[in-house]
Amino acid sequence: MGLDMQPLTSYFPVILRGVAVGLVVSPLAILAARRFGLVDVPGSRDHKRHTQPTPLAGGLALAASLMVNGLWEGWLGEPMLLAGLGGAAVILCLGLLDDRRDLRAWQKLLGQCLAAALLIAGGVRVRLLGEPFGLLLTFLWIVGMTNAFNFVDSMDGLAIGLAGIASAFFMLATIDAGQPHLAGLSAGLLGATVGMYFFNLTPAKLFLGDSGSQLLGFMLATIGVAYLPRNFAQAASWYVPILVLGVPLFDIVLVVFSRARRGRKVYRPGSDHTYHRLVRLNLDPPRAVFLMQRGGVVLGLLAFIVLEAGPLVGNLLVVGLATAGVVLVLFFERRAPPEG
């Protein structure tokens, strides 16, 4: 079945296939992760609070689901998607090495830049500004969002739930924009996250690991750059992917700001993420996860509601939300500062 049809119903098989493969492959990925030593051991770092050794199998399961859908739908025949999948392969391999050996920060950054370069070579880039600023902005967005999902993956079900929500919004948006292959990729990602969600819920049978969380961030960042709504230039719709991915973006800004002002290394893991701050404000873990994921839904709805209102209203909304974000960062720093 191809993806030349525009109706929403034509993407349901892609979602279902992603769910089915995710459910079937996740147990196999768990076995493979155990076999190759991709296991998160309790207490290996201060911020790790789980009690049982847990396979870092998320990247393997996610890649398998996307590969099956990609071969079925013929994504390899589309240059843009091929470039995205090529970059995704780099991110996956990098993440698996990191899960196994703990790569240095510069090594991970170099690999992420390579993946971004492959994407740009395939024609996927920010066209809001002329060269070289558009290329620089593309690198910053891809690398930043790849790491944002790695950062926000601080509790079972959180990052994969946010990714599923963003995928659903992007699928509907790209169908409306007349970008069927991009809609198919979004649908496949949605299905994969739904299928894997069962295994990532508390108590998690698998963790996403760096391979899974970074792969989610890279794929969603790619869709965000490639998305171009009908009758809207990128200059009038640039804020849409930012709002759809607003929760992980807020989390990485909060963490970077908090660690920088305390003189801590930004890339060191810790218990200073949005989720941890909400728990320190006396929210129980499920409610903290629920609140962050519902925040993702609200921001996604706002993005596409305001898009129809025009660029002026959209830009004013972004300014207002950015101001609210700054206030929220300061609130967290005052009322729920990092431990230690």
Image: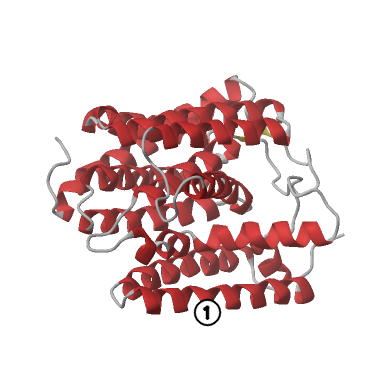
Residue 290's place in the image compared with 73, above or below, is below
Across and down, in percent, residue 235 comes to 38, 62
Q: Is residue 280 left or right of residue 8?
A: right
Question: Which quadrant is the C terminus positioned in?
Answer: bottom right
Residue 53's place in the image compared with 284, above or below, is above
Q: Residue at the spot x=68%, y=30% of the render?
A: 107
Q: Is residue 105 left or right of residue 30?
A: right
Q: Is residue 281 visible?
A: no
Going by the numbered disc 1, the residue's amino acid type is Gly
Q: Residues within 10 Å of mark 1 (few under 14, many from 20)?
A: few
Q: Which residue is mark 1?
A: 320
Residue nearest the viewer, comparing 122 with 62: 122
Across and down, in percent, residue 307 comes to 33, 71
Q: Is residue 297 visible?
A: yes
Q: Is residue 201 left or right of residue 339?
A: left
Residue 224's place in the image compared with 331, above or below, is above
**Residue 262 figure quarter:** bottom right
Q: Residue furthest front?
A: 131
Q: Residue at the spot x=51%, y=63% of the render?
A: 246
Q: Residue at the spot x=30%, y=31% of the render?
A: 79
Residue 269's place in the image compared with 105, above or below, is below
Question: Which quadrant is the N terminus positioned in?
Answer: top left
Q: Is residue 111 left or right of residue 162?
A: right
